[in-house]
Amino acid sequence: MRKPKFPPDLDAIWQQIKADPDLTAGFLDIISGSKPDDYLHWDKLRYHDPPKGLTSEQWWLATKKQRQSLYKELPLMDRDRKPFRFLMNDYITETLHKIDQSSIAFCEMPEPITNTETKNRYYVNTLIQEAFTSSQLEGATTTHLVAKEMIRTGRPAIDKSEQMILNNFAAMKRINKLKDEPLSRDLVFHIHQLVTEKILETASAAGRFRTDGENIRVMDIYNEVFHDPPPADQLAHRMETMCTFANGTSPDYFIHPVIRAVVLHFWLAHDHPFVDGNGRTARALFYWLILRHRYWLFEFVSISQIIVRAPAKYARAFLYTETDDNDLTYFIIYHLDVIRRAIDAFYEYVERKTKRLQAIENQLRGIIVLNHRQRALMSHALRHPHQRYTFKSHQISHNVVYQTARTDLLDLEKRGLLTVRKISKTWYFTPASELEQKLAQLE
């Protein structure tokens, strides 16, 4: 990936403008009449046509002047003690509103989607998806199918890629239990230990700061330095400040919880306090904070599945911020777009799933090889894949004699739609795996 061009010196451009009174007046008119733009970095703006009468450099200065009046400083500093800052524009405000609306809509979804068993299935699928794609961002090379099989069967990892995925899965499950705890250094270290278990070259590096001797830099394959994080002797203080921010006690103005979670993601990644696993820990902390603020929708939303489709954009969002006066707005806009797309993907999945269930239920009505009691049980099983049925429960549900209930369930088991297991003296029937597909194929 090419490193973005650093913006031109604003003071030098301003001195040139001031030397021409006519240009100065017109320039100030442009600033006063300007509106929020598409938030272009200099690396992109320089390829666009500037307003009439201005050079690209002068247009950049006008853009920066317009932004500077809107910036708010954050307690996050770079290695030279210069603060990061951000602003709120129409896109950010509108996207935050849509995220809030999506979270409300999630609570109002129909029962076939929000019943406990269905939600648990979605939840586990999302954990697997996030664990897999977050690991892909860090170089894991296995497939989603293998990752899913490994996690669902509980088998141990056979290589570093699989171990990374297992670690991420464990960390994401743990995050949900940690969300009510305030962020602390010990908690961050604990999350780091979870995501790096058994994969660090030096096992003792898990759950501790990097040292002066562990000179960590982010470089490309040609050894060009993209990011030189703060020195190790600053890390303890920086993490204390980060935890204060994450717990909502700084700064002294309101920050929307989603923005706060995005900034926390950037903060940990920027400081790079560990020898490895910084990206995975940063993304886990984003989830910790967003769930801490009761955005339950994010239990079912994978941001890494969006990021992994274009990892260069992810890296560029960091670089845009760090090459343009610590303007975190670039990363915020990028991350909000990722969230919006991840939420859209979830709702598209739910819509497909809902239509699929409706189609199968419609099909069930026309399956003449099943009687109405069996069709009713199959309809229930689609929504409750872990439900256990017995001869007695089926008999009571449909007010039939024991022999009729027994015949119904054994017939469904024979057709491969139910599986059966005897515990003590009772036979228990549970929905077969891939039940949807089997019903769709049933004539």
Image (cartoon, rainbow, N blue to C red):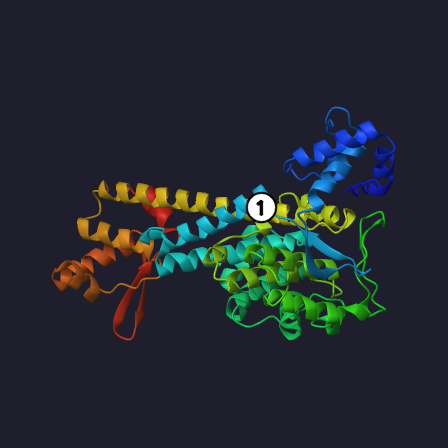
The answer to whether residue 158 is seen in the rendering is no
Q: What is the number of callouts on the image?
A: 1
Q: Nearer the viewer, residue 338 or 220?
A: 338
Q: Measuring from the top left, give residue 372's x and y in whole percent.
A: 18, 49
Read off the residue under disc 1.
92
* Left or right placement of residue 82 versus residue 328 in this view: right
On screen, residue 324 above or below 40: below
Q: Measuring from the top left, give residue 44's x and y in whole percent.
A: 73, 35
Q: Which of the 4 image quarters holds residue 238?
A: bottom right
The answer to whether residue 131 is seen in the rendering is yes
* Left or right placement of residue 155 versus residue 46 in this view: left
Which quadrant would the C terminus be assigned to in this image? top left
Q: Which of the 4 image quarters holds residue 9?
A: top right
Which quadrant would the N terminus be assigned to in this image? top right
Q: Nearer the viewer, residue 396 or 213?
A: 213
Q: Measuring from the top left, give residue 313's x and y in whole percent.
A: 68, 44
Which residue does the image show at 63% across and 46% down from the upper left? 334
Q: Nearer the viewer, residue 365 or 65?
A: 65
**Which residue sits furthest top?**
52
The kind of residue on which mark 1 rests is: Ile
Q: Nearer the viewer, residue 261 or 92?
A: 92
* Left or right placement of residue 318 versus residue 105 in this view: right
The kind of secondary structure element at disc 1 is: helix
Which residue does the image show at 75% across and 29% down from the upper left? 26
The 10 Å Cα crowd at callout 1, few under 14, some 14 to 19, many 20 or more, is some
Which residue does the image show at 67% across and 40% down from the upper left? 39
Q: Which of the 4 image quarters holds residue 43?
A: top right
Q: Measuring from the top left, give residue 45's x and y in whole percent.
A: 73, 34
